[in-house]
Image: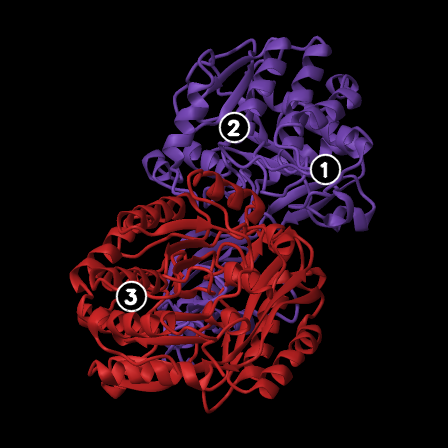
Chain colours: A purple, B red
Amino acid sequence: MPKIICGEAAGCINGGRLWDRMFDLAQYGALPNGGVNRQALCDEEILARHCLVRWGKAMGLEPSNDAAGNLFLRYRGTQPNLPAVMVGSHIDSQPTGGKFDGPYGVLAALESVEAIIDAGIRPQRNIDVVSWMNEEGSRFAPGMMGSAVFSGARKLEHILEIRDKAGISVERELKKVLAAEPDVPRRPLGDKPAAFLEAHIEQGTVIESANKTIGVVTGMQGKRTFHVYVTGEESHAGTSARRTRRDALVSAIDIVHALQQAMWDAEDVTQFTIGMFTVSPNAPSVVPGRVVFSLDLRHPDAAKLRDLGDEIPKICQAARGRCEASVSQLLHDPPLEFPAAIRQLLCTAASALGVGWMEMPSFAGHDSRYLHYVCPTGMIFIPCQDGISHNEVESIRKDDAMDGARVLAESVLALANATSAIWP
Amino acid sequence: MPKIICGEAAGCINGGRLWDRMFDLAQYGALPNGGVNRQALCDEEILARHCLVRWGKAMGLEPSNDAAGNLFLRYRGTQPNLPAVMVGSHIDSQPTGGKFDGPYGVLAALESVEAIIDAGIRPQRNIDVVSWMNEEGSRFAPGMMGSAVFSGARKLEHILEIRDKAGISVERELKKVLAAEPDVPRRPLGDKPAAFLEAHIEQGTVIESANKTIGVVTGMQGKRTFHVYVTGEESHAGTSARRTRRDALVSAIDIVHALQQAMWDAEDVTQFTIGMFTVSPNAPSVVPGRVVFSLDLRHPDAAKLRDLGDEIPKICQAARGRCEASVSQLLHDPPLEFPAAIRQLLCTAASALGVGWMEMPSFAGHDSRYLHYVCPTGMIFIPCQDGISHNEVESIRKDDAMDGARVLAESVLALANATSAIWP
């Protein structure tokens, strides 16, 4: 176990600076109702990345990026050849997202490093503040792209081919983002970090309900995502008789109805969401010829997740009526548990700083999933108001943000001062 | 009754010229699979209008347009102060429409006039070939906008405010279309024609099944259209529990299911279509906060149409679950019957020319609906292959197109030579 918490770095956390940076960053892609639309690789994200680089350089950090569009800001340690400790999250948002989902983790990481610097501490290991490319997956699905490529879970070539609804590829947009950073050196992909920590807003009400400040994350529920394609035939709403129609919307609605019944869970553990549902040609007097919709299925139990997901193609075929239906799986991430030693470190730091904490699972997916496969990884959550996230009204408390950064700063510092391999 | 058919104009119908013009016009907004995307007031429609004006001028017709964007090509009669006979249809298309729905009627009208000219005939009345603005209503709903304003059924100010999905107004796009025709004189709105005739593809299989060439249209079934707005709350697909969600897609699907059951008609007379269904933010891992969908309800019986339509708001409220729902009606057009004298004229013309005909209702709406309110109006249909329309594969036979133009030419000429009011 790394050396324990002395509180010097935490004492230098500047809550006002952290808070102001969150609002400054939220200007890039700001929406009229206080939210943010800064989907991965858009022009607003380019400007937000430039802003991160400016802040990092101002405190003496060394920026770099990699071929997957991940952005790093390095505080050089006294033994720079040791594997680095990484800390961060993402700055891309949902189409109508909030200010904190993602940016809090990146900016709390930046604040942690600035506090360590302000405390006059130079740790042994390099500390890399990181912003992972496309965590949300709203424009280019699936999400967590940058961390998946970094960790080797996905191939770069594969993600470059993915396209958004307008047919624009990740390759094209990524080229644009990297070309806009001519002064940022390129680092090789797939460096193996010493450890990774991520702070994030909870996006639920567990911490709030327990009257705590910090959730130390035990692990993540599993997730499978699918696209369902329903193909019928376009025809005229006034002249085609019902019995001759092959109405893709009618079939899609029947499929959705059948899926909702099959996924119904009285205990409300299974999570099943259809977030994207696109009809074409989507004209009032044309019988729809095609519907594409997304399925997002989550469960903390690996076997249950597997069995429920495996039912999906059968249900779609049984309910498709006079149309064709096909199902493709985008993602199958089993449930995971973070290492006990990292969780212990985070709990110890919170206790030493007098911050109320609890252990809890993560119901959302995060970049930590993929880092978990390559290095010791852990997460902390801070509360978000009423658990509302992926929504413009998403909100957090300044004191919670500051306490989260304090716990993060001490934990990062402890890891960065661990001389040998962090785990036995 | 106007003087009867002598066949001189029909004898000058040039089937090759008519056929070539349909393919020439289909270049504006051509799609890769042979169809057309030329939605109302788009740039491709501007070019198609210029093409019509060129063709009309080449045969000596006088172009004009009105403030509602309707385009006219006048063949001046020997008594130009008498009300004109109008003949035409529309050239706008569905997003993935065919080459013939609309253009056939405009180009058969143009061919009729060219045949009358080629036969050396100058009738007493002016003949106006017309292309009505926005019949389809796919970009700007509802459709039949130009003919509705022309006939006084809708106010120009009202349609100018209507916006497409991108928030662009009819006013802005109409200004662009009219500005692109600086050499075309503006005529006043709401001229009262002597009569109106429209040729159109059937968009069903009635004529085909009866082995006829021409359908003389008896009237139109009634139509009501609605928009349903379902409002819930956006939340995170991984962290929000089902029982706390206000998922607008779940409520919308329940509403659609309930509506489909209520509108179910074992005899397949009632037509009920949901052609547009738009989810926001439409992102895979966000619980949808809002769904808007269209309802298109058609029935030949006025009382049944009224009663079914009046049920819709109640059904939506009963099935909305934890979300809000509101319903707005866009259109309520009762069933109508075209005047017997015009139908008789069309049947007589077809018989005189030896073209097989039958009487039949129109299941689709057409601009003739609104013209029917201001002048004696009639329609003929020609078969379209397998009844498929509003689809890129829409197809017709060249011989049928020619026969339709022959019947149209003789009928238009008979009306244009009627010196006094055409009806008793």
In the picture, the disc for residue B394 is 3
Task: Name the mark nearer the viewer: 3 or 1.
Answer: 3
Task: Name the mark nearer the viewer: 3 or 2.
Answer: 3
Say which amino acid is labelled 1: Gly
Pointers 1 and 2 within a single chain = yes
* Chain containing the residue with disc 1: A
* Chain containing the residue with disc 3: B
Q: Quadrant of residue B246?
A: bottom right
Q: What element carries label 3?
A: loop
Q: In this view, does A173 lie above or below A188?
A: below
Sequence-wise, the earlier of marks 1 and 2 is 1
Mark 3 and mark 2: span between their CA atoms? 41 Å
In the picture, the disc for residue A34 is 1
Mark 2 neighbour class, 10 Å CA radius: few under 14, some 14 to 19, many 20 or more = some
**Mark 2, residue position:** A43
Q: How many labels does the image show?
A: 3
Q: Is mark 1 on a helix, strand or loop?
A: loop
Q: Where is residue A136 in the image (x, y as percent from the top left)?
A: 54, 41
Mark 1 neighbour class, 10 Å CA radius: few under 14, some 14 to 19, many 20 or more = some
Of B369 and B303, the residue lying toward us: B369
Q: Is residue B414 above or below residue A419?
A: below
